[in-house]
Image (cartoon, coloured by chain):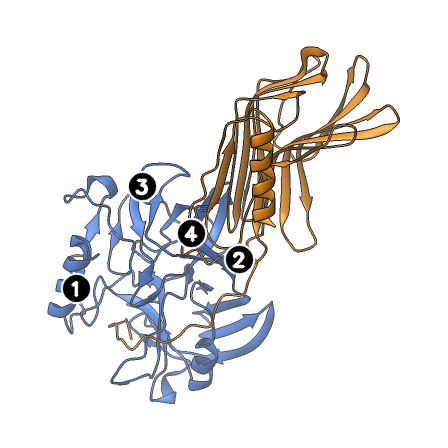
Amino acid sequence: MRKRLRYGVIAGVIAAPVAAAAAVVPAASATGGGSPSSAFGISAVGLVNIPRTPVVSSESGPRSRSVVSVPASPLVHLSVIHTRAVPGHAEASVADLKIAKAAISPKAVLSAKLISARCDDGAGSSRLVDVRLAGRAIQAGTSPNSRITVPVEGLGGVQVTVNKQVHNADGSITVTALELAVQALGKSQTIAISSATCAGQSSGEAPKPTPVPSDLPVTG
Amino acid sequence: MVGAVAVTAIATLVTGCGGKSKSPSTSSAAGSSAPTGKLPEATTFTTLKNIPKDTAALASADGTVVHPTAALPVSVTPGGQPVATLPAKELGGPTWVPVVETKPGWERVLLPSRPNGAAGWIPSGNGKVETAHSPYDVKVDTSARRLTLLKSGKSLGTWTVAVGAPKTPTPTGRTFILASLAPAKATYSPLILPVGAHSDSLDTFGGGPGTVAFHGWPQKSVFGQAVTHGCVRVPADALRQLSKVPLGTPVQISG
């Protein structure tokens, strides 16, 4: 799965003028149990489709990837997306993001200096820096799943979910720093930016100890 | 790697056999100001200065335990300057410590060093921490001289035990099972289960750093008595049950 997605990104790199830098660190000795951690920087589903980019997933050692643009997406401009995952931890960040309303309208409807999400042992958090949607500042609160609706000319009300946190059936949690949802031309369009998934702390039972052939003078 | 602190501790260990009186601590270090420039290891042999104490000493932990797969820095605040390192091994076995507080990217854990209740922050999410859950709880009531072992909140047994004598009491507060040791010569117990706590009245004992432990005892007559130097002597059945309890499992000792 990971390989297929990586090749997908690479194919996109060839098809579009994209400079991608993928840094894959070899598996380390980490042995965290439970579900794999994963992260992606951006995805869109609807009239505009963007596969989760760039996806990283880890069941054993650290994995990280960076890309500097999104393949075949003229509406989306950014300086860099970085994603990283190790067991029990995942993070994603998107820097200098601009999303246009339409290809013929270069003016950004959404702009952000930084949108990042991180997941640590089943606890999620999000960070938004200088995020504006149709001129309105969007800020990350401390509580998850903050929702507001922002009117955008030509699109109607865009539902914005900040620090979206979903508890998955396998015990992991997914935190998405910013999610936009809108009904456009009778179809729903969603865009997720900076998403991280990791397993909770109580993913496995601690082992029964193996006695060490040793002694320690204790306070008998 | 064995640091100067551990060397000092071992030197104290081999020269101080039989000592019971209050004497200079086995070793001490003050974080980044340690003379060698190296951070002290958080082990049962060391004393960590300027390390905050567990703020909820009698609260129940949720059973989350962590094992560093490599030495990790320990700081007073999340992201703060490291003041010690938590090694991957303690007393020859894997290090497992209980988590008492979490913040994104950081976990506050109980440490096996003096002073009692020492707790510090270690980084998580770097692939160097294995996280697991211990369903067990060990509770010791020194007044009632009773030990109760629980699994998932249900009692597996309650035993009458021997606790510290009035002049060498078993220290109260929240600690954890540090190691499982099988001595070559089982003088008084086939198994010794040191915990993270130390005697408050004895800086050293028998050449060791005054570590409190669970262990057996040949004479059953001691159970129910306050006669030890701080350790908790338990009946054979209790020791058998405790031998299955994962390292890092929280131990609550109340007076």
**Along the polypeptide, which appears first: circle 4 or circle 3?**
3
Q: Is residue A196 visible?
A: no
Residue bearing the label numbered 4: B109
Residue bearing the label numbered 2: B60
Residue bearing the label numbered 1: B10
**Contact? badges 4 and 2 (CB < 8 Å):** no
The label nearer to you, 2 versus 3, is 3
Crowding near pointer 1: few (<14 within 10 Å), some, many (20+)? Answer: some
Q: Is residue B248 visible?
A: yes
> Does B76 sit above or below residue A98?
below
Q: Amino acid at mark 3?
A: Pro
The reply to whether label 2 and label 3 mark residues of one chain is yes
Marks 4 and 1, how far apart in space?
Answer: 25 Å
Q: Chain of mark 3?
A: B
Residue bearing the label numbered 3: B82
**Along the polypeptide, which appears first: circle 1 or circle 2?**
1
Q: Chain of mark 4?
A: B
Residue found 20% across the figure and 45% down from its top:
B38
Residue farthest to the right? Answer: A186
Residue A147 image-quadrant placement? top right
Q: Considering the numbered disc 1 on the image, is that residue within a helix, a strand or a loop?
A: helix
